[in-house]
Image: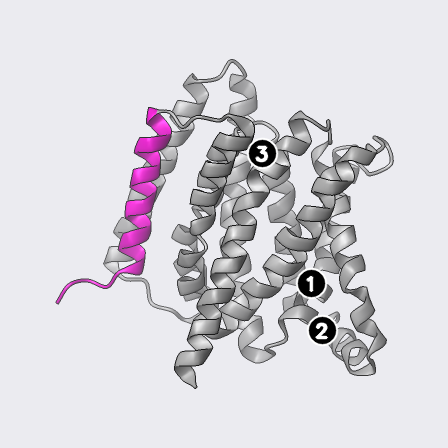
Amino acid sequence: MHKQRRVTGYLAILGASVLWGTSFPVIKFGYSELNLSPITFLTARFLLSIAVLSPLLVKRAARREVAVYIRKPDIMILGAVNGAAFSFQFIGQARVSSIVASLMLNTYVLFTPLFARTLLGTQITPRQKFATLIGFLGTAVIAFGNFTGTDNILGSLVGVPMVLFAGVLYSLYIAFSEKNMNSTGQPVLIFYTSTIYSLLVILIAGFILRDLPGIRPVPLRALLPIAYLSLFCTALAFILYLYAIHRLGSVDSAVYLLLNIVVGIILSYFILGEVPDIFIYGGASLVFLSIYLIKEPLPS
């Protein structure tokens, strides 16, 4: 029974990883081809995700669970962190390539053990500390290449740190997810309730940046990528992810999510024509090495 639970957990995390990998080129496509602003794009994505899951509230038991969850401080923090992470990602990704965004964002794997130790009491080994340093070196190489390989240096100076900080916030979200899934185990309702707080944070970001929905009308041809991101890359992917967290734990789940880097790079090449340069190859190699060191135990 325990083995079967882990197998379903692995299948869930791989499904979430593939879906999230497809989101990077779709987001960039929305910016470049559909002229969508970051917060407008993001708000539409989250609103539709909430709307799709709202029929669950027809059941009285679901309404009772949501009424309990929505008052829990951990759920508020979970949603707020996720909303902030997405806001930083979307604003930052408007200024960097899809490939750079996927690599920078997935540095969350390096930070996850740090937050897991704080929130869950997980021990950090010297190997994991060394792996984190290697990972930071890899992100520095990628960032340097992005600065030297673009005419929009100011945009890169803003975009790269924002996407990287989004990765830090996602690692905090991962640790909080495990904490909440260990105590409740209701992935759909946890995602639904926490997303209400995520949307609130996104709207606050839109107010600060004067990028609230409605100021810039969403073109009809943008509905398809918004719907895809909402239904598959948000609602379905997060439910699969929270289910996997419950089965595998935060650190293992974070590592398997790295498949989305491969998916993102391949699709960015074929859909957007983005070609990795020597800095991306070198930095990505260091990032993957650091991830291997975090995941694998020391030889005896």
Q: Is residue 245 above or below residue 290?
A: below
Which of pointers 3 and 1 indicates the residue nearer the eye?
3
Q: Residue at x 67, y 29 (%)?
A: 31
Residue on which disc 3 sits: 93
Query: Considering the image in quadrants, where does the N terminus appear?
Result: bottom left
Marks 1 and 2, how far apart in space?
8 Å
User: Nearer the viewer's eye, disc 3 or disc 2?
Assistant: 3
7 vs 155: above or below:
below
Q: Amino acid at mark 3?
A: Gln
Which quadrant does the C terminus fall into? Answer: bottom left
> For the residue marked with disc 2, what is the amino acid?
Tyr
The residue identified by callout 1 is 194
Display colour scheme? one colour
The residue carrying mark 2 is 69
Mark nearer the N terminus (1 vs 2): 2
* Magenta region: 278-300
Find out whether the residues at labels 1 and 2 contact each other: C-beta distance under 8 Å.
Answer: yes
The one nearer the camera, 117 or 43, is 43
**Residue at figure coordinates x 77%, y 78% from the top left:** 62
The mark that comes first in sequence, 3 or 1, is: 3
